[in-house]
């Protein structure tokens, strides 16, 4: 508590605290959603299996318009990345140095998860466990890593995409949205591979809006009125970089997003659910569709409408300290929340106390609250153990400018990490993998993370 109080007291006056609150809320909602929708069963052989309850709760599909909060995370990620990049450049740093800074906060906590799970898989294999079963457990625990594949790719592209934002402003996300539309057309008419670019274009579009929000930082929240939508004097003629943040803009985004969403889902070909539903041919999030971007627009409108009350709340010391505390370990909480579920399920099953009620039954609903509370306790224990890795990572700071060799190695390190995570995510759930993940995925990840670690330590500073 003492450290949180000190961090709260040292918070710069110009910090957009709302961004930190949104990041914490987004990750919290993802975790609660995953936990609450879990259905645990035993197969005919007596082995534990699980799936999402969403396929059995069709009435809940519209609720996913709020529960799908990955757009919020990419929006606040764009704001935070623009802020940290411009701040480092003001101190004389460059893009490569910024990427190294970000790798400390993003890759180090991820490496702990990957290495611990791999070690556990190796032990299980040596003790005679079925490689297919090992992969199933590893696959479930690493579901959060699919998000990091996209986010790390977006982070790597932040310097050139921010340069495009400075040159073309809001035209950039509009072009990206058009590319998502073309990808959707390919997914509907074939070939489906033509939509794979949406994995990048969709999240980049939302991330660019975060850049535009950051450009409004000079205006105080109280100035969020109709005049706040006027172009800035610092913007080139014909180029708008600032995101409209007035209440009127919030209403336009909310109404426009909801209207487009209804047209695309209720009347159009896209599923109403914004989360993966077993058996559905199309998935709005894999890759991101126009329907998901419509959700992002509606959520942005709601965010703008709640901006004033949120700022008033966060001026209070208590709420702000809670937000700081969550953000110190926010990635750790996200990465380990499904591992917490595996640990709890294993403990309950080993003691013969694991409930397996039928989904949507009275018993299943009654089990939701104790289930969530027990998971929270297990996750808290895991965060106490591994959370300090992320908390310390935030203190890393790169100064000066990197040489060309160091810059190239930094990008190569990111590429290897992304490749390793991508191979793991693309590997089928039931593939026989003694280490839980394919060896090429593990080698690529360890090589990339190792290079980034060496560069942060000062290796290859001359280039």
Image (tube, grey):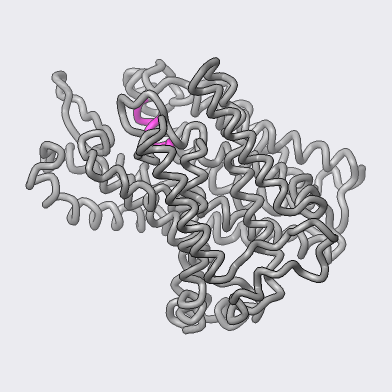
Q: Which residue: 52% across, 60% down?
A: 252
Depth check: give the residue in front, 101 or 250. 250
Q: Is residue 239 magenta?
A: no
Depth check: give the residue in front, 216 or 376. 216
Q: Which residue: 51% across, 21% down?
A: 438
Q: Which residue: 20% across, 35% down?
A: 56
The residue lying furthest to the left in this view is 362
Q: Is residue 139 magenta?
A: yes
**One can see residue 456 in this view:** no
What number of labels is visible?
Answer: 0
Residue 268, given in percent of the width and then of the height, sits at 41, 33
Residue 217, given in percent of the width and then of the height, sits at 68, 71
Residue 390, given in percent of the width and then of the height, sits at 55, 56
**One can see residue 166 in this view:** yes
In the picture, the quarter occupied by the N terminus is bottom left
Q: Does 281 sit left or right of 48 as displayed?
A: right
Question: Which is the main secondary structure of the residues drawn in magenta?
Answer: helix
Depth check: give the residue in front, 462 or 73. 73
Q: Which residues are magenta?
A: 136-143
Q: Which residue: 36% across, 43% down?
A: 338
Residue 262, above or below 242: above
């Amino acid at each position: 508590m003492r450290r949180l109080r000190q961090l709260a007291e040292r918070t710069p006056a110009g910090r957009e605290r709302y961004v930190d609150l949104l990041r914490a809320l987004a990750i919290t909602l993802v975790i609660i959603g995953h936990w609450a929708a879990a259905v645990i069963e035993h197969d005919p052989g007596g082995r534990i299996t699980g799936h999402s309850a969403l396929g059995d709760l069709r009435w809940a599909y519209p609720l996913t318009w709020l529960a799908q909060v990955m757009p919020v995370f990419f929006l606040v990620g764009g704001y935070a990345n623009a802020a940290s990049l411009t701040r480092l450049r003001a101190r004389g740093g460059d893009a490569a140095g910024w990427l190294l800074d970000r790798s400390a906060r993003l890759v180090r906590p991820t490496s702990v998860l990957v290495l611990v799970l791999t070690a556990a898989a190796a032990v299980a294999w040596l003790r005679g466990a079925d490689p297919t079963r090992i992969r199933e457990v590893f696959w479930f625990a690493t579901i959060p890593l699919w998000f990091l594949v996209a986010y790390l790719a977006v982070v790597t592209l932040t310097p050139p995409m921010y340069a495009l934002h400075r040159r073309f402003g809001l035209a950039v996300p509009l072009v990206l949205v058009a590319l998502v539309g073309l990808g959707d057309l390919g997914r509907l008419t074939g070939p489906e591979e033509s939509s794979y670019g949406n994995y990048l274009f969709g999240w980049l579009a939302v991330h660019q809006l975060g850049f535009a929000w950051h450009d409004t930082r000079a205006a105080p929240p109280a100035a969020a009125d109709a005049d706040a939508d006027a172009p800035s004097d610092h913007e080139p003629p014909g180029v708008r970089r600032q995101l409209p943040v007035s209440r009127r803009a919030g209403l336009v985004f909310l109404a426009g997003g909801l209207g487009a969403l209804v047209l695309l889902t209720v009347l159009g070909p896209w599923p109403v659910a914004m989360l993966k539903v077993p058996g559905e041919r199309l998935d709005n999030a894999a890759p991101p569709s126009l329907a998901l971007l419509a959700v992002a627009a509606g959520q942005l409108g709601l965010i703008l409408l709640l901006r004033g009350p949120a700022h008033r709340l966060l001026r209070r010391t208590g709420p702000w300290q809670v937000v700081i505390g969550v953000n110190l370990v926010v990635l750790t909480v996200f990465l380990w929340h499904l591992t917490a579920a595996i640990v709890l399920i294993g403990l309950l099953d080993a003691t013969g106390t694991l409930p397996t009620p039928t989904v949507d039954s009275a018993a299943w609903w009654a089990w939701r609250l104790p289930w969530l509370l027990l998971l929270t306790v297990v996750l808290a224990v895991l965060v106490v153990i591994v959370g300090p890795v992320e908390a310390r990572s935030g203190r890393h700071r790169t100064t000066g400018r990197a040489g060309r060799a160091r810059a190239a190695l930094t990008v190569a390190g990111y590429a290897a990490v992304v490749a390793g995570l991508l191979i793991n995510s693309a590997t089928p759930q039931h593939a026989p993998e003694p280490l839980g993940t394919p060896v090429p995925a593990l080698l690529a990840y360890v090589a990339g993370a190792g290079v980034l670690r060496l560069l942060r330590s000062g290796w290859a500073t001359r280039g």
